[in-house]
Image (cartoon, coloured by chain):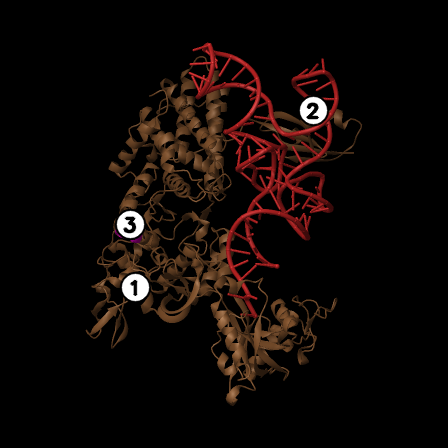
Amino acid sequence: MKESYYPQELEPRWQKYYEDNKTFKTYDDSDKPKYYALSMFPYPSGKLHMGHVRNYTITDVIARFKRMNGFNVLHPIGWDSFGLPAENAAMQHGVDPAKWTDENIAYMTGQLKRLGLSYDWDREVTTCKEEYYKWTQWLFLQLYKKGLAYKKEAAVNWCDKCGTVLANEQVIDGKCWRCDSTVEKKYLSQWFFKITDYAEDLLKDLDQLKGWGDNVKTMQANWIGKSTGAIFRFKVVDAPNGEDIEVPVYTTRPDTVHGITYLVVAPEYKDIEKLTTPENKKAVEEYRANARKMNEIERLSTERPKTGVPLGTHCINPFNGEKFPLWTADYALVEYGTGAVMAVPTHDTRDYAFAKKYNLPMKVVIQNPENPSDCKDEAYTEEGVLVNSNEFNGMKNTEAKKAITQKAVDGGFGEFKTQYRLRDWLISRQRYWGAPIPIVYCDKCGIQPVPEDQLPVRLPKDVDFSVVGKSPITTSPTFKDTVCPKCGGHAVRETDTMDTFVCSSWYYLRYADARNSEKCFDRDLVNKWLPVDQYVGGIEHAILHLLYSRFFTKALRDCGLLDFDEPFKNLLTQGMVLKDGSKMSKSKGNTVDPDEIFENYGADTARLFILSDSPPARDFDWSDAGVEGCYKFLNRVWRLFSANQDKITLDYKLPDKVQKYNDDLIRTVHMAIKSITNDISNDFQFNTVISRYRELTNSIYDYVGKRKEWTEEDKAVFSFAATSLIKLMSPVTVFMADEIWHELGAKTSIHDEKWCEWDENLAKASSITLVVQVNGKVKDRIEVDEGLSNDELKETALNSPKIKELTEGKTIIKTIVVPKKLVNLVVK
RNA sequence: GCCCUUGUGGCGGAAUCGGUAGACGCGUUGGACUUAAAAUCCAAUCGGGGCUAUACCUCGGUGCCAGUUCAAGUCUGGCCAAGGGCACCA
């Protein structure tokens, strides 16, 4: 065994060995229980970054730990390889997106292997390959058949820089999630998935997800945005041309209905022209034109003062016969509720601000009986009792919500209503590098799905990437024209491709049956492996990917393709990797290249370090000194073995009875096994696991330092300690562990070993430190035998000279004994 | 504004049930080895005070203020700060 550690040589050697021997291949037929460990698959951007390293190392250690604990582990990897960067590269450098992507995948595959990740490479999936996107298209058709994929004309989010529309989830503060440019509204005909059909399911089933953090669950719940209230329909009494017209509103405060003093419709409200009198027409038109010009950010700013103009028409409140005016104002949103709002300035802060500005009347209808407010200075939005509300006066507002809505239902002018903020998922993209939507438009038959036996609809190669203002796919001379599958006549293909989030919404299912060319996946295999037992990835997908995947699982369940409701049983959202307090990014210039770390220290050091300093869920601050420290530690472990190789055997036999000093080391090892096992099992606290590695290593070094002569017993105990250490470390420092293992004479890989077990009786110190407190303050510590009873502990405490002195002349009122731990004397 | 998460030494962070606060590491300081350096090893390292000094003793200390308890980093109530999410969503 070499005297010092040499990762640069030994790591590639083992890497090749694992590859040649398919050490980590997973077989479907096994009598072991299954465990599915999954990292969020990467976009092949070119190179791994430290966030990837952290993500994949965490999952890899989990997979290896479970394997050693007797599970048949599925631990796959793939590539989320459709998307804009490849197309941008094509536009800028004239390189084929497929080639660009392939090259990136090849490079990053090398990096993943170098990092020592125990993937079953035979299950690799690549979303941009025909063998994969064929099934993405097939799944689209299944959703289409179920009525869950549909096309509609709608106001959609348009990113001019990316040249495509975006889903609501991809608009962050009015800006594009990818390129940060301001998003505009456009009216376009686009494909949607009906995720709103699953709003209630997606919300309700969050309760099932015990293994998800509350942060992610509340983010999803907020996004779904459920509220309950009522719809009220108000008749317009003075519409131009005497038209008979109603305006429905959605409200969560039906209890305030007697306080309506005006009504607001969104500038884009569909009937707005019919609601506008000729005298007001000009002002209203102007206001609407202005609203149209505003971008999302301006429009949605809550700071902007409220504006609006009257329409000139009026409604009657059927509850009290009062007449109130109609206005248009852009604080009403056309896409939420009915696009119209009943305004009660006394009990809604927005209505209050608006009414104040335009001098609209106010009427108090809810009051706190203890502390009545006249709502002159601000709206009263708390609970209370109804006033000025006819037969409902005196009723608690929480009860009145129901009673008043019921009255509307009975009177035929309203109903109970549950409303969600979630919108349907817009999946069309006007880009080339994605899965083509398998639809054709026939001149005669209209929209026609591509028959399943004609899949995949292949991406054309004969395209011009230099075009501006339209998707390159539309430049293909061969792609667009086709025949109608129904009538055989002329038809044109849909040229939009699918959002890449569609591809990533089902990839975790494909791993269960990755090479199936006949089917999307075998139902039994998917039901066998899924749900994912442990999913690991970044918090940035809390809404996007995780919500879409949950939707897909439920929709495919309803299509009869699988038998479970939720795809990811446990979710670990790892924190960001920071350097100097901020997120690593190229623009900040604070990135660390994983290759450089591999080169200088080896993958094991990288793996050890990325797990060592913070618990996985927290942000991790990269420090060069920390890497150095981990490298030194590995050297120290290496030297422990190289300097003592003659004393370590793999087939040691521990005697039944050993010397006290040997018993102490054995106990230390058992305690380490216990705490390491528990720390991994309990929320994957790898940072403390690594502390235990160091503690155990320190203990073994202490032991070695004290031995002048070595008995056979000493060697056996030492062998036990050293081999336990290297096994415990093997999921983290994968290459070094196998190298040492072989240097010790093993013929098989350490990664085929069973996890260490501990004996509960040995996993505790032979003596304990009794803490003696007086009035809750620690006054003495006494080494006592482990087996002492509570009475004996009390006796020991009272006999301590220190305690005697402190209690001298005082009365002991009470004595608390915590078994094997502590005695607290309450004295006066 | 609403919701979630987090607040512990110079730093990253430990601390099953309420029971020794600061494990382990980084950094710093001192020492050993060396011609020297690197590497390695040993020791000290929350703050204030006491003692010539070591040992030791003592007081304070887990964002702030209260409370419960023999005992609070941990439980309860009220605040404050940072990070994140949602947001004219009626």
Which residues make up the magenta segment? Answer: A89-97
Magenta-span inclusion, residue A94: yes
Q: Is residue A759 visible?
A: no
Chain that is coloured red in the picture:
B
Identify whether A72 is placed above or below A347. above
| Relative horizontal placement of residue A437, taking residue A235 as reference (left or right) | left
Please tell me whether mark 1 sits on a helix, a strand or a loop: loop
Find the residue positioned furthest to the right: A809
The front one of A530 and A88 is A88
> Mark 2 to mark 3: distance in Å?
82 Å
Q: Residue at x 39, y 38 (%)?
A: A593
Q: What amino acid type is highlighted by mark number 3? A: His
In front: label 1 or label 2: 1
Q: What amino acid type is highlighted by mark number 1? A: Ile
Q: Residue at x 39, y 29 (%)?
A: A726
Q: What amino acid type is highlighted by mark number 2? A: Ser
Chain that is coloured brown in the picture:
A
Sequence order check, earlier mark of 3 and 1 = 3
Report which residue position mark 2 lands on: A800
Location of residue A309 (image quadrant): bottom right
Report which residue position mark 1 lands on: A437
Are labels 2 and 3 on one chain? Answer: yes
Please tell me whether mark 2 sits on a helix, a strand or a loop: loop
